[in-house]
Amino acid sequence: MPRQKFEFANAEGQTLAGLLETPLSGRPEDWRYAVFAHCFTCGKDIAAATRISRGLAARGIAVLRFDFTGLGGSDGDFANTDFSSNVADLLAAAQALEAHHSAPSLLVGHSLGGAAVLVAAQSLPGVKAVATIGAPATADHVKHLFADVEERLHRDGEASVTLGPRRFNIRRQLLDDLDAHASAGHIRRLGRPLLVFHSPLDEVVPIEQAARIYEAALHPKSFISLDRADHLLSRQEDAEYVSATLAAWAGRYLGLMAPPTRPAGTVEEGEVLVTELDKHFLRGLYSASHALLADEPLGMGGGNRGPTPYDLLLMSLGACTSMTLRMYADRKRIPLEDVDIELVHERVHARDCAECAERDGHVERITRRVRLVGDLDAAQREDLLRIADRCPVHRTLASAPVIVTHLVD
């Protein structure tokens, strides 16, 4: 399941609602885990949180995003929360993730969630890297949101405020707690690699806050400008950019396996090299100019990090068939607009194979389905179908090639 419902209890015993975005490939024991903290009064389903979490999951990092106490699908009263309770919720999320899967090695925080992860990380020894997105350096930055009701809060202890499209009740304890988190000293003690994302056009949290974070942090630290993005990363391309660059940056600290790079000077033109990348089934496949992965499915004991050997065989035949049809159609000026090749490999009993010469035992059968798109007449379709059988890979497979194997030093 790529997305799983994930509920857990906070420090007060209230149930918090979360979603765990998991990678579509790889073995769960090889995944890395992250916790995503959303912006103030937002929720786990805000577009930026959803898109970034899914983008990280697509790159091998399972991400837990959840609603803080009193928000979204989580229990509790928002009026009873403050910045410290948000940090406590983050710690509870990390502990629950460790209990059911694995401890998070990455914390990601958006806006005030970024300020929260900078505090929470110091209580989570398993965290290897931290990233903030449009975050203030300290929690007290959000006090300006309550300027109109600050006098009432001090007088009555409680007030109603409008934040975004919603109205919330808050209590004086929130202001007092924000004042208690006005120092950036904890950032200097972070002790983890830090990546700071911020837009110079952010009108909610000015970029000067990113400068405060960066100046307070010790190396290794990095900053990435989000160019024209708004505070909520409402454009899809901005969220996808964050997830792609964050995954690439975090990979070196989380020990994620990068795509294979071609071994320098070891593969000649016309040759290929296959190497072991783990002690299971993951293999690096190299030509003189390219690199990719081969693996087996999870059910076969592999990590599902790449196509199987038989998948690659079918892909080779399909690619060659498609290329041959395109070359022939162009040369003969046949109006072929598009071509799809579907292939299936089966091991069938000879007596059930009408196309096979042998009638006993089992035979290997590849079924190839050719879909031709364009204003083609019947004669042109038949001509192209005939040409499909003449692609070089097809002819190689049909000729029962001799395979010679040698041991080398």
Image: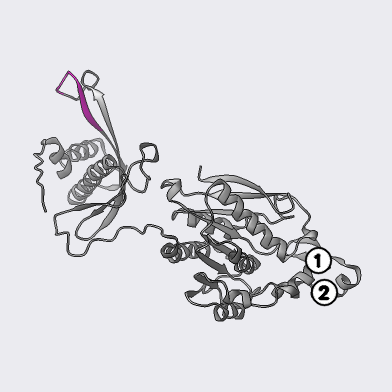
Q: Position of residue 284 (x, y in %)?
A: 27, 53
As displayed, is residue 9 above or below residue 152?
Answer: above
Amino acid on which the number 1 mark rests in the picture: Val
Whether residue 234 is visible: no
Q: Position of residue 400 (x, y in %)?
A: 11, 35
| Element class at badge 2 | helix
Whether residue 276 is visible: yes
Label number found at residue 320: none
Q: Position of residue 44 (x, y in %)?
A: 63, 55
Identify which residue is drawn at 61% across, 61% down. 37
Q: Is residue 373 left or right of residue 250?
A: left
Label number found at residue 148: 2
* Label 1 packing within 10 angstroms: few (<14), some (14-19), many (20+): some
- Magenta residue span: 357-366
* Label 2 packing within 10 angstroms: few (<14), some (14-19), many (20+): few
How far is disc 2 from disc 1 in space, using C-alphas? 9 Å
Residue for badge 1: 161
Identify which residue is drawn at 65% across, 55% down. 92
| Element class at badge 1 | strand
Q: Position of residue 3 (x, y in %)?
A: 54, 46
Determine whether label 2 and label 1 are within 8 Å by CB: yes
Amino acid on which the number 2 mark rests in the picture: Asp
Earlier-in-chain disc, 2 versus 1: 2
Between 46 and 13, which is closer to the camera in this rendering? 13
Dividing the picture into quadrants, the one containing residue 212 is bottom right
Instruction: Find out whether residue 360 is within the magenta segment.
Output: yes
Q: Is residue 123 left or right of residue 237?
A: right
Instruction: Find out whether residue 128 is within the magenta segment.
Output: no
